[in-house]
Image (cartoon, helix red, strand yellow):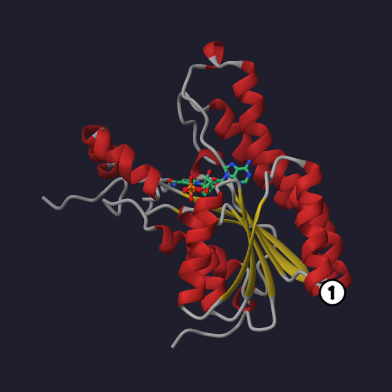
């Protein structure tokens, strides 16, 4: 039976039009939450809304550029006007950016990735935290990546942005734990979102090489990764503050397999 632990809860999800964000929005709604989904992709948002409403859940969707302060402020003002509260925020929207060595990385591309992945999390929390404080508490999950723990060649902007996300999370956790607000980071590994699946279809050799390096020998399902975000925001994680939960099929464990003689 699906628990109803988000009943009476108002839940914000960014990147709700696709992948991990869509799965999380569906899971929060299935567990009783009223979801406010944001994304740049309006078609994706409409699909998420259909999926949730067909399953009997509740969702309001808005086109929001999470890197734009005015748009983020207006989104939170809308939630405040319509519900007067915010209990959960999953700050998850993100982009990968291009792949180049540092010396070749276009500065404008570097700045863009930091704006969408890092500035967005700062802006989100800037407007979410006061609402949660007024309501007596809440839970925030910010999406980083295993790129916050490793050195993925060619992806300097992405790795820098995702390290920054966990830095912001830890500061937010320290500043708000006494206000009954828990803030944690989700660090997904290789997750088979539609974009990753279509890239793999175009480059099966790379995909086979990458997944064979994962101890679980497969990529994660978006639903498996979203489940960890939902758990971090649920009452079951009530004593988890300022942590990074890595969901990567063992990719970053760094050991080696034992082969019997
Ligand atoms: P996705 O592309 O399926 O979803 C990301 C969503 O964010 C998209 O719907 C996109 O439109 C939205 N978005 C992008 N820029 C935006 C902006 N400026 N404003 C609002 N929305 C915007 O990808 P996903 O895999 O579900 O990614 C979700 C998060 O997980 C991202 O932060 C990503 O970095 C992280 N992540 C993904 C993987 C993976 O393998 N898929 C691994 C590690 C981390």
Q: Closest to the observer: 137 or 112?
A: 112
Q: Is residue 164 above or below residue 21?
A: above
Left or right? Give the position of 24 relative to 242: left
Residue drawn at x 59%, y 52% is: 92
Please state the horizontal and vertical placement of residue 221, each as a whole percent of the image: 37, 58
Q: Is residue 104 above or below residue 61?
A: above
Please state the horizontal and vertical placement of residue 43, each as a whole percent of the image: 51, 52
Pointer 1: what residue? Answer: 135
Residue drawn at x 50%, y 69% is: 26
Q: Closest to the observer: 35 or 196?
A: 35
The kind of secondary structure element at disc 1 is helix
On the question of residue 228 being in view, the answer is: no
Left or right? Give the position of 153 relative to 72: left
- Total number of numbered discs in the rendering: 1
- In which quadrant is the N terminus drawn? bottom left
Left or right? Give the position of 183 relative to 261: right
Please state the horizontal and vertical placement of residue 130, each as a whole percent of the image: 87, 61
Please state the horizontal and vertical placement of residue 78, each as a whole percent of the image: 79, 62
Residue drawn at x 23%, y 51% is: 258
């Amino acid at each position: 039976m699906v628990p109803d632990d988000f009943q009476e809860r108002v839940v914000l999800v960014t990147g709700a039009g696709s992948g991990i964000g869509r799965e999380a929005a569906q899971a929060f709604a299935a567990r009783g939450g009223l979801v406010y989904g944001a994304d740049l992709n309006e078609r994706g948002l409409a699909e998420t809304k259909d999926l949730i409403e067909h399953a009997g859940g509740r969702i309001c969707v808005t086109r929001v550029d999470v890197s734009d302060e005015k748009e983020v402020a207006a989104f939170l003002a809308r939630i405040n006007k319509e519900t007067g509260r915010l209990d959960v925020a999953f700050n998850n929207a993100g982009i990968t950016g291009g792949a180049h060595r540092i010396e070749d990385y276009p500065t404008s591309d570097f700045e863009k990735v930091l704006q969408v992945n890092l500035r967005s999390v700062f802006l989100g929390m800037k407007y979410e935290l006061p609402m949660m404080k007024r309501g007596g508490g809440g839970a925030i999950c910010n999406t980083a990546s295993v790129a916050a723990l490793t050195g993925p060649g060619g992806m300097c902007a992405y790795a820098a942005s995702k390290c920054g996300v966990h830095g912001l999370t830890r500061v937010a956790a320290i500043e708000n734990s006494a206000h009954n607000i828990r803030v944690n980071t989700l660090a997904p590994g290789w997750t088979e979102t539609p974009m990753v699946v279509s890239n793999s279809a175009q480059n099966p050799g790379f995909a086979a090489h990458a997944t064979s390096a994962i101890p679980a020998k497969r990529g994660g399902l978006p639903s498996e990764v979203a489940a960890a975000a939902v758990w971090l925001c649920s009452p079951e994680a009530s004593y988890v503050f300022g942590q990074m939960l890595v969901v990567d099929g063992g990719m970053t464990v760094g050991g080696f397999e034992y082969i019997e003689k």
